[in-house]
Image (cartoon, rainbow, N blue to C red):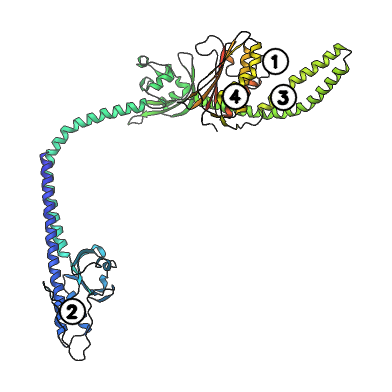
Amino acid sequence: MVVLLLLILISISTYRNLDREKAMALHFLYRQGMTVLHSLEAGARAWMMLPMWQDDSIKSLIRETGRNTDIAYVYLMNQNGNVVHHSNPDAGVDPALLKLVANLEDGVLTRIRKMAQDIQVYELVKFFSPLTTPGALQTTIPIPEHGDIVRPHLHRGDIIVLGMQMTAYEEARRSDLQHAIIMGVILITLGAGALFFIFVIQNYYLVGRTLEQTEDYTRQVVASMANGLLSIDADGHIVSYNQLALEFLGLQDSEVRDLNLNAIINFKTSGIDQILAHSRPVLDREIMHKSAGSKIIPLSLSATPILDEGNQCKGAVIVLRDLREIKQLEEKVRRSEKLAAIGKLAAGVAHEIRNPLSSIRGFAQFLSKRLEDNPREQEFAQTMVTEVDRINRVVTDLLTFAGPTKAEPVPTDVTALIEHCVRLVRSEVDLRHIALKMNISDLSKARLDPNQMTQALLNLLLNAMQSIKSDGSIEVGAALNPLEKRLEIWVEDNGTGVEPEKLDTIFDPFFTTRDKGTGLGLAIVHKIVENHRGEIHVDSPPPGKKTGCRFTIFVPTGTG
């Protein structure tokens, strides 16, 4: 600390000395330049007193003055910025000079001008006043007349510009800087020893602390990864891991110590043996892992070898990625493609069937009327009408399923919509002695397609009624989930429910558990929910219940 403070004080002192010497050198240049300018004015004044004064006299005076080795150039410029006389035309004129002297008045403008090849010139600019003597009174000297000699005209606005060479100044400056640098190097060398020992002492502390922080940060990064991470040695034993990897593999921290990963993941089928034996990386290999709870998890396995200095494999780093969500998306895509194909086929078949159905039904009704005297044959004809009507209902469901998929959401009163659906099934519910209750929280309007959503709720209500044998109960409700920004609508019954093995197929077209069902009701509900960019979940039995089934529709509140 003392050495550092000493270096700072010496640096400040050196800088101030250099700055002071610079100011003194510039002041010397200023004094020298002012002497030259006054000499030019005095010379011009002396020449103007003589009878042989001509316009070229001041030109000669400026050129002779410019021959001095300490002078870079000197020139006279009128108030319009035009150069009248110049001792060194190659030096040129700064176009911005005229703006700088706009407010010059009677003072002297000084500046350092950078020329070509980084040559610096100390420039002095003032009004050229040879007829005014310098001093406090600034007296004007009259010019004597000499017959018919024409005098050159000198105006009050004429400007004299003098450029002084700074070569000697720059050499002295460089010498001072070199001296300061040498002194600084000596001081730094002397202080380096003391600083070195201080650095060595602190280095042990800082290195240890840095390693500790790096380990903590690395541990946090590994723990926060969205994928499972493992490292194994050359024998396959687990060396390090993150918590997500243990969750994927169904392991606990206490089970990992001295555990060989080959007992959990088959090295041969996963390709890890090729890494350990031949250092061949494995990228995105899909494996199906069965955890202790008999739950199969699809995983993507990527592994790279850990090589030592001799390029020998010391182990491997394994990354496990959960594919369950991707598999669900793939299943949705396959289902969408399947439903699209079925929809096209259904639309075509329905249109082809519906036309002849009308003719068949008409002939059956005609036969039924003509056979009024023959009850047995009339019953056959009436059966034909009933079965044609049943076929027509199936065709209608097909057309509904294959119809336009785009929803037209509008601000809809959800409570009124549900109450309307309940009124439509109220008579059937009362006839079968089913208790139907509504559980609706305070809801604002949501953007829904009221026609499609009404059809979906009616299908769910009818499906619930058909699963109840007698004296059952149905609950239809709705609530807004502000955290997830979605509307929840559910229909719950205490009927027979759905068998677990059939939960994945109940929304497939033509799948039904009833003898007279078409298998299109729930498929149409699923399609309507997808039109609203929502989801539908099935719980059989509902949470906390032993029997029954609960269908829950989730619709984003921003749909539309």
Q: Nearer the viewer, residue 146 or 112?
A: 146
Return the disc, 3 or 1, that comes first in the chain's sequence.
Answer: 3
Indicate the secondary structure of the residue bearing disc 3. helix
Q: Is residue 122 above or below residue 278?
A: below
For the point 12% across and 45% down, the residue is 7
Return the disc, 1 or 4, that comes first in the chain's sequence.
Answer: 1
- In front of the other: label 2 or label 1? 1
Q: Please state the horizontal and vertical placement of residue 397, each as a whole percent of the image.
A: 68, 24
Crowding around mark 4 (Cα neighbors within 10 Å: few <14, some 14 to 19, many 20+) is many
- Identify which amino acid the numbered label 2 is placed on: Leu
Q: Which residue is mark 2?
A: 61
- Identify which amino acid the numbered label 3 is placed on: Val
Return the disc, 2 or 1, that comes first in the chain's sequence.
Answer: 2
Gap between marks 2 and 1 measured at Cα: 125 Å
Q: Is residue 278 above or below residue 33?
A: above
Return the disc, 3 or 2, that comes first in the chain's sequence.
Answer: 2
Q: Please state the horizontal and vertical placement of residue 22, each as a whole percent of the image.
A: 14, 59
Q: Which residue is mark 4?
A: 526
Indicate the secondary structure of the residue bearing disc 1. loop
- Identify which amino acid the numbered label 4 is placed on: His
Q: Which residue is mark 1?
A: 516
Indicate the secondary structure of the residue bearing disc 4. helix
For the point 14% across and 66% down, the residue is 30
Q: Which residue is mark 3?
A: 395
